[in-house]
Amino acid sequence: MHRVVAIGWVTGLLLFALSCANNEAGQTPNRSANNREPHTGIADTALWKSLEAFAQEGCVFNETPIKGSTNQGGYAFEYESRSGTGPTGACRWYRLRNTPGKLYTPVRWKDLTEIWFDTALARCDAGSTCPWIDVVKHSLRAVDGRSALSYGVNKDEFSDDPSAFKRHGDEKSFVQGRGFPPLVTTVSGVIADVEQRPIPISIRVVSFVSPSAPPYEFAYEISTGPTSDLSVALNGKPGRGSFQVIWGATSSKAFRKAAADKGLESVAGSEQQANVKFEERSLTVNLEELLVITQGGQPIFVTTAAAYRPGEER
């Protein structure tokens, strides 16, 4: 498996990012008379295929997917949920894409304990093929059930409750009882930026712990995909560029010290990779860590990215 992981900033910044994602990124209505209609921009099917391949890496999806579409208030888009197999057990693949001829669409898709998408889909020209945005998560087990899908103004103007493959409710117990398998989240595809223009993003974050008893060795790896303008700071300070990645899992003092000791500051650009390792005597399993992508300080994408963290810090 091609392994990877990402970086983090302070908890306060994460909370700010999530608050903004909930309250700001979905302000522009689809039907506003003042709504800008930027060009679709990305029409490279070879690029889309490479983004999709990056998302699925390490997983095999042969199961029948759960597919659906929604059409309310002038918004119309497709969604998919797939279950497959991976190195630790199950892989879960979530997808969204706009419909040709439809405009910018703020959307949030989640379960009770996990966010799959909190973002916006760029407009898609009539007669064109719209790109997907994919999120893949490695799990020990997956179950199917109802989910919460909302979209439109403030991402809550309209809603639905489609079926989806979800993380098992006892995932934390399974993780602790199975020798702490890698926790993997991959994001890859096309979303809308703050100007409602389509942009490709691709990043994978992975958290490792070994052995199964203290002292524990923590390992965090991050990889950017085939095309990416993302910048991931490894020292708690903003990296260069407009598109920043924030992962709460790597905001600990131990992580930042280890990154500084290796002289690591950031990862930026396409197909880049870095890892940070350190030892601690205690750990916690946080299945609700957030991975946030911001542009100019404003969140444009949020998903849950589970991780191992050191226990109480001194």
Image (spheres, grey):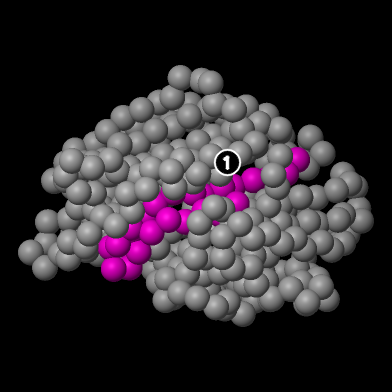
Q: Is residue 82 visible?
A: yes
Which corner quadrant of the image does residue 301 belong to?
Answer: bottom left
Magenta region: 181-204
Assign the N terminus to one quadrant of the image.
Answer: top right
Who's the residue at 49% across and 46% down the image?
Answer: 51
| Nearer-the-camera pick, 84 or 10 | 84
Taking the view exactly as shown, the residue that stands out farthest to the left is 33
Residue 152 visible at all: no
Q: Is residue 300 magenta?
A: no
Q: Residue at x 39, y 52 (%)?
A: 190
Quarter residue 290 falls in: bottom right
Task: Say left or right for 262 vs 12.
Answer: right
Residue 141, position in %: x, y? 63, 29
Q: Position of residue 220 (x, y in %)?
A: 73, 57
The percent position of residue 40, horizontal first and vertical second, equals 26, 55
Label 1 element class: strand
Magenta stretch, main secondary structure, is: strand
Residue depicted at x 74% and y 73%: 264
Q: Residue at x 53, y 21 (%)?
A: 62
Q: Is residue 184 magenta?
A: yes
Q: Is residue 143 above or below residue 278?
A: above
Relative depth, front residue between 18 and 56: 56
* Mark 1 lies on residue: 137
Q: Is residue 299 above or below residue 48?
A: below
Identify residue type, mark 1.
Answer: Lys
